[in-house]
Each structure stands twice: as structure tokens, then as C-alpha cells.
């Protein structure tokens, strides 16, 4: 026995007390899609309300129908503003807790490759693909990084999405020690 650890079992940053690897359960594509869909609906409702409030003065004006149509068609501006809102939403939640509202409801979480919290740089990179290039990001991810169920921007940011264990499983192996 090594005397430097005072008789206690050696610990590892990558494993449990007996140095076994920690099991990480990758979230399914279905769970990830459902979380994205929930987030999409929530943010879209918020954006719909925001755009309605912005457009409200135009509804009350005496413009002709042609002028009203010009103001109602935001085109690329609408897409850009929406994408920026989604980007801010996902970057904030993935950096602060690893879970957007959709991920919380489905009990999944974004982490770094070792299961730790996502830093701001990684959250920003990961959210960019989801906000601006999602179809391309997912398709390329399925083709090239499917062993860890990563989108391309998950791969670039070194992040994964994991399934969280139910609360009962988290508390059954807890051991308390007094100092």
C-alpha cells in the first residue's frame, strides 16, 4: 500500500474510487431532437410576441395595403434576428447549466468530453451550428461523428450531450465521511 495516500483508495479524475472508468450515457438523437423542438417552440413564441409588438404601430397606421405589405415582409432580417435570438438562448443556457428548457424536460445535458460543465467558448461554438446551420450540422454529424452522437459543431467544440441518471441512482452510491 502506498503511504502517500494515508491508506485510502487512490482516486482518478476519469474514474471512480477503484479507478474504473465512469460510464457516460450519450443522449439519443430522438431526445435531442425533442429538446430542440421544445426550445424552438418556446423561443418562437417569444419572438412572435416581440415581432407583433414591433409591428403593432404599423397595424394602427393609415398606410395603404401595399405599404403595409412592404413592412410585414422582413425577409432575411427576420431570419437573422431569429437566429441571433436562438444563438443567445442556447449559448446562455448551455454555458450556465448545460441545459436549455427542452433539455431539462428530457433530462439531458450538454457537457465537455469528460462530463464537466461547458465553458463559454465551447457553448458559443456549439450553439452557433444549432442556430445558423442546423441541417448541415446534423447531417454532417451523422456521417462523420456518429460514434459519439455529435453534430459537427459538437465535435469542433469538444462537447457531447448526455442522458442524466434519475435522482434515485445518483443518491444510492453516496458515501459520507467526516473530516
Image (cartoon, rainbow, N blue to C red):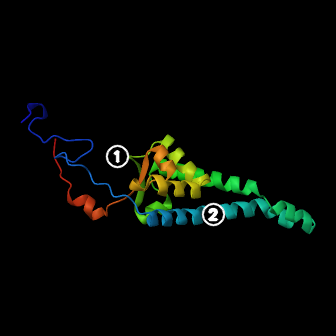
Lateral position of residue 148 relative to residue 33, left or right: left
Whole-percent x, y for residue 42 in the image: 58, 64
Q: Residue furthest left?
A: 1
> What is the CA distance from the residue labelled 1 to the residue labelled 2?
33 Å
Q: Which mark is residue 133?
A: none
Q: Determine whether 141 is above or below 168 in the image.
A: above
Quadrant for the C terminus in the image: top left
Asked if the residues shown at circle 1 and circle 2 are in contact, with their CB atoms under 8 angstroms apart, the answer is no
Whole-percent x, y for residue 12 in the image: 23, 41
Whole-percent x, y for residue 116 in the image: 37, 46
Closest to the observer: 61 or 77?
77
Picture quadrant where residue 25 is located: bottom left
Q: At numbered mark 1, what does the secondary structure look like: helix, strand or loop?
A: loop
Closest to the observer: 170 or 10?
10
Residue 62 is at least partly visible in this image: no
Whole-percent x, y for residue 158 in the image: 44, 45
Q: Nearer the viewer, mark 1 or mark 2?
A: 1
Query: Which residue sits at x=50%, y=50%?
Result: 152
Q: Determine whether 118 is above or below 104 in the image.
A: above
Q: So how many labels did they put on this image?
A: 2
Q: Which residue is mark 1?
A: 114
Query: Which residue sits at x=90%, y=62%?
Result: 67
Residue 104 is at least partly visible in this image: yes
Q: Residue furthest top?
A: 4
- N-term-proximal mark, 1 vs 2: 2
Query: Which residue sits at x=16%, y=45%?
Result: 178
Closest to the observer: 129 or 135?
135
Lateral position of residue 19 relative to residue 134, left or right: left
Question: Dot 1, crowdedness within 10 Å: few (<14), some or many (≥20)?
Answer: few
Q: Which residue is mark 2?
A: 44
Quadrant for the N terminus in the image: top left
Amino acid at each position: 500500500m502506498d503511504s502517500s495516500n494515508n491508506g485510502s483508495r487512490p482516486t482518478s479524475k476519469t474514474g471512480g474510487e477503484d479507478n474504473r472508468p465512469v460510464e457516460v450515457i450519450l443522449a439519443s438523437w430522438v431526445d435531442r431532437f425533442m429538446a430542440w423542438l421544445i426550445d424552438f417552440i418556446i423561443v418562437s413564441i417569444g419572438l412572435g410576441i416581440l415581432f407583433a409588438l414591433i409591428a403593432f404601430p404599423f397595424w394602427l397606421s393609415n398606410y395603404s395595403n401595399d405599404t403595409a405589405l412592404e413592412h410585414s415582409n422582413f425577409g432575411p432580417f427576420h431570419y437573422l434576428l431569429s437566429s441571433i435570438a436562438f444563438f443567445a438562448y442556447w449559448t446562455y443556457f448551455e454555458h450556465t447549466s448545460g441545459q436549455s428548457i427542452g433539455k431539462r424536460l428530457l433530462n439531458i445535458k450538454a457537457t465537455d468530453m469528460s462530463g464537466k460543465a461547458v465553458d463559454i467558448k465551447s457553448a458559443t461554438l456549439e450553439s452557433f451550428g444549432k442556430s445558423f446551420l442546423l441541417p448541415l450540422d446534423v447531417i454532417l454529424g451523422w456521417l462523420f461523428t456518429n460514434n459519439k452522437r455529435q453534430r459537427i459543431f459538437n465535435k469542433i467544440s469538444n462537447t457531447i450531450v448526455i442522458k442524466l441518471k434519475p435522482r434515485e441512482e445518483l443518491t444510492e452510491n453516496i458515501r459520507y465521511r467526516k473530516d
